[in-house]
Amino acid sequence: MQTIRLTTAQALLRFLSNQYIVLDGQEYPFVQGMFTIFGHGNVTGLGEALEYDNYGIKSYRGNNEQGMAHVATAYAKQRNRLGIMACTSSIGPGALNMVTAAGVATSNRIPLLLLPGDTFADRQPDPVLQQIEQPYDCTITANDAFKPVSKYWDRITRPEMLMNACINAMRVLTDPAETGAVVLCLPQDVQSESYDYPTCFFEKRLWYIDRQAAPDRAIQKASELLKSAKNPLIIAGGGVHYSLAAKTLEGFATKHKIAVAETQAGKSALCWDMPFNLGGIGTTGTMSANRLAKKADVILVVGSRLQDFTTASKWLYKEAKVIQINVNTMDAHKMDALVLKGDAKATLKALSVCLGDYQTNHDYQQSVAFEKSQWDKEVNHLYHTPSIDGKLSQLEVLGVLNETVTENDTIICAAGSLPGDLHRLWKSKKPKDYHVEYAFSCMGYEVAAGLGVALAKEAEGVQGHAFVIVGDGSYLMLHSELVTALQERKKFTIVLVDNSGFHCINNLQVGNGSQGFCTELRFRDKNGEYQGKTLPIDFAKYAESLGAKALKANTVADLKTALIKAQDYDSVTLIETKVSPKTMSHGYESWWRVGVAEVSKSKAVTEAFQKMHEEVKKARQY
């Protein structure tokens, strides 16, 4: 057997550079690059390998470990999981900074390869700087914290262990049913140790995504259920995108005349003006989708994990029989569904054949058309409703932005009230023009994701601009990869909506009996409360100090001009908009369960608890 002597780190890069994913006969190089923040634990091992023989894996310098891992997650999400970026960190705090990002990737079913440095396997200098020590178990390090948020976790304590670990890592990363964060912990001594690796380990390896439709038995039963339904509804989840099934879904809905509602991950699967697209579903859903969901007797779910915002805490369509098309067994069984375990595209095609010429009746189709027309009027009204204090309203900002972007552009968001507004109101024009992370809804994802989407568009040769829309609270959480974008000369536009606080959570407080507590960006007053003046933060000046272009927009006309200017600049541009608080959209015939105090000194809180308790009785229990 022919061998080659390499360090563990060198062997890892050589292996990763030759992995390909295959879908529908097309090969995609899988690992496209590696984000790095070097420190002790990776700089003299993996760092040496990247510097002197990276096998074509390009290095990107991150500025915060969580941020760079968000870039990688956004990159893989935008590329429909057909290409990834790996991330490496030092030990201790550097590694732990990536735990949140691992949670984002795993909850969103996005492949993310993390390579945190680790303590010495031989323990000779034990304990080292930044090491966590546990007197009851010396094998535990900070990297064990990744286990709850990972789909595969391993620690490479000998160079030869790398081979088995790499195969398992790729197995999970390329599996549509099981993908998520994969963590390979690399002790700093082992990274630099050498081994005679068999050369066959480094040969080109193809990982196939084979499309398999659900079994005929299940498809036949689903067909019978749909034909018996008076008010069917399709819910499109992220699996529609990852299966490249957007056109298939459009054809299915058009042929059988069934309305479609979209989850956050599924949004943009259909163009907003497609006749049977009712828009977002659930707690942040549209009036039209939620009204039909309440009446639905059969719901066909395509590739969704059915989280509580999609189901309105299992309150919205509690009487409906659920059919779930999903490659993931756990997701497919949720809400006591009829399981159609299989690829979304293949299963939709098979189900359509089984349905034959079936179409919903004329009254149902008229009802769908009416509800859609009413909602379209509501969106136009909201987009053009100014605030009462002379500032821009949050919805005006969205309206101008929606009118500006083209079908090749992408809107990016993650947390606060903006994802709800986008889910309800954004008019998607083309698949993947909408990129909202709402499984973890991670504050601080947005700016990093702007870079990830820009890199993904570049890798795919797609013309178009990335637009990040982010609240001031989420922006302050994490925006360090703005500097990485400047360093890499990648451009995108950040529209910063400043309402001086966490007003999404403030709304949640006030709606459940609070008077508003510790959620606004205000000075502490003489009474010790955060009731003073709002903090006069100049976000534009701050962005300029980092090297970005910055503009301010205080009117609709200003914003239109700024958005055009931003696309002409050759770098990241931040547009600061001061908006009036409480100018977001609100729920449309939906509900969301939160834990309200059963006893309280506040009468408003106890009343909110009673209301919540009554709504729980109306919800589905499993």
Image: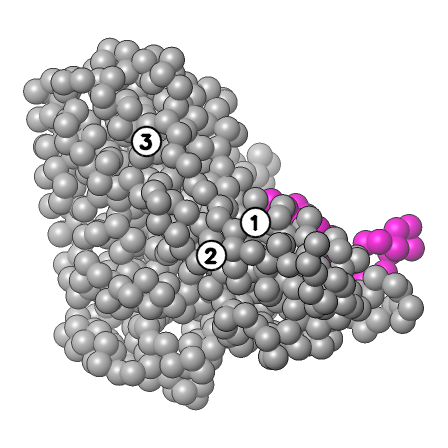
| Image quadrant assignment for residue 301 | top left
Q: Residues within 10 Å of mark 3 (few under 14, many from 20)?
A: some
Disc assigned to residue 170? 1
Residue type pointed to by label 3: Ala
The reply to whether residue 4 is in sight is yes
- Of the residues shown, which amino acid type is indicated by label 2? Phe
Q: Residue at x 40, y 55 (%)?
A: 28
Residue type at numbered disc 1: Met
What's the magenta region? 132-156
> Looking at the rendered structure, which numbered label has been put on residue 312?
none
Q: Which residue corresponds to the image point at 45% horizontal and 43% vertical from the top-left?
A: 208
**Picture coordinates of residue 437, whole percent (x, y):** 42, 53
Q: Position of residue 523 (x, y in %)?
A: 51, 74
Distance from the alpha carbon under mark 2 to that under mark 3: 23 Å
Residue where numbered disc 2 is placed: 30
Query: Which numbered disc, 1 or 3, marks the residue that appears first in the sequence?
Result: 1
Between discs 2 and 3, the one toward the N terminus? 2
Residue denoted by label 3: 346
The answer to whether residue 612 is above or below residue 273 is: above
Q: Relative to the observer, which residue lies in front, 523 or 46?
A: 46
Asked if residue 551 lies left or right of residue 2, the reply is left
Discs 2, 1 touching: Cβ within 8 Å = yes
* Disc 1: CA contacts within 10 A as few (<14), some (14-19) or many (>=20): many
